[in-house]
Amino acid sequence: MPLFIVRHQHSPEACPARDPAMGAMLLNHLSRPSAARNGVAIKGEAVVRGAHSLFFIAEAADEAVLQAFLTPFRQAGEVEVMPASTCAEVVASGGCDAHPTQVSTTSLDPADACQDAIEAGLVVHSAYPLNGETSVRDLAGGAVMPNGRFYLRNHFDIPKLDGESYRLSVGGMVERPLSLRMRDLHNLHAESLVVTLECAGNGRSLFDPAVPGEPWGLGAVSTAEWTGVPLIEVLERAGLRPGATELTFRGADGGLVDGHDAPIRFERGLGFDQIRETGALLAYEMNGEPLSSPHGYPLRLIVPGWYAVASVKWLTEIVVSDKPCEAYHQTEKYWYEWVRNGNDERAPVTLMNVRALIASPDQGESLPRGETAIRGVAWSGAGSICRVEVSLNGGPWHEARLVGERRPGAWQWWELITRLDRIGPLAVRARATDMTGRIQPERAEWNRMGYGNNSIHSVAARVI
């Protein structure tokens, strides 16, 4: 409903609060139940002491409904009604003087989605499209990330799909083209996998010199338990024809991008052999709950080990072919581009790099002297984590203890119990090594689009 700011002004001589009956009447009229009966929702109110002014924020179907509700206040003084917007709506629409964003019936309201992300505790980088990261401190909360605090990466509007009318089509070079309802997918064999997803641009803001793109810190990563149908099972039901080697996954989201006149859909491609190796899942649940719209409702692809761009949300089509996908987000984005020895080189973004993050202590935190625990998470797309090492104030590397079960494709908790005896600055550094022998570099190689930054994580704290 439209939002309004109301200002009620009265003279000192006619202050209604001095009349107990009048004051009580206005107070009761302004109550939430009374406002609701009149078609108005009160979001907050306050009186400016000594100024004989009352301000409140209200929602109503239109201004006429609100004006009718304000009749008692008009009898007690002057009333001014001003159309308003939430802060999230202003940012999503591009400024205080911009026209409100026209919300399509097929998309979530950007302002509402942004407000939900903020209230959940995400650090929002852009409201439209909505992109927000988890605070690194929140990574220490448990084996999986609560759905509301799971980071969000979007390229376009967030589609609002109807689960009842939804269909997943599987076509191209298949023996039996499929059109699957959610009911059909729920009737197939289900599996649950704990999988870490990381945006390929995580850590982009730490590259020097700066690179374009979302200025992610270190929180564009989260872990959830995903439940759904193994992708390979659906492909086997469709039956791949001889020579079929490539799969294109098409989401319901799309829009305009620089350099293209017509709108495009979000699409990504993977080879059939790559899919078979990953154990990819067509997920319809996240941490035991149906997917929310921001996370891909009603169905998303989950590709363990790969940067999350491969885990296409709002999945509507799988196209089987003998040719690689040539979509915009496959050929023009998500490539490492380097200049090496004066020559341009590029390689596609695929598996997640090995990485450890320090969740505790937090940046700038003060720690008491004595025994303390350094904790964090580590993950890699190429293999399980086999070792995490921690260095304090530039000293030797000490091996941390790996905590909990090792799950392929999911992050690994770690901790180091140590003593802090000297007051003063404390520099904590952590690095991980995976089962394939990959180890975090001191500094990740700079690339033009800012992907894959897995430089050794460092936190500056203080011992008091």
Image (cartoon, rainbow, N blue to C red):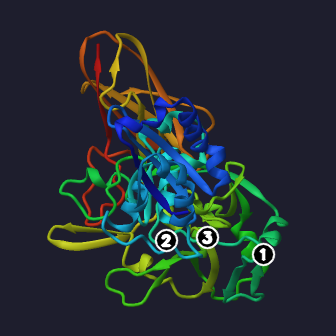
N-terminal of the two: label 3 or label 1? 3
For disc 2, the neighbor class at 10 Å (few under 14, some 14 to 19, many from 20) is many
Quadrant in which the C terminus is drawn? top left
In percent of width and height, residue 155 lies at: 44, 69
- Name which residue lies at 47% across and 32% down: 17
Q: Is residue 382 left or right of residue 332?
A: right
Q: Quadrant of residue 86?
A: bottom left
Looking at the image, can residue 319 be seen?
yes
Residue that sits furthest to the right in the current view: 187
In the rendered image, which residue does mark 1 sit on? 181
SS under mark 3: loop
Front tag of 3 and 1: 3
For disc 3, the neighbor class at 10 Å (few under 14, some 14 to 19, many from 20) is many
In percent of width and height, residue 79 lies at: 42, 53
Q: In this picture, is 28 found above or below 280?
A: above
In the rendered image, which residue does mark 2 sit on? 157
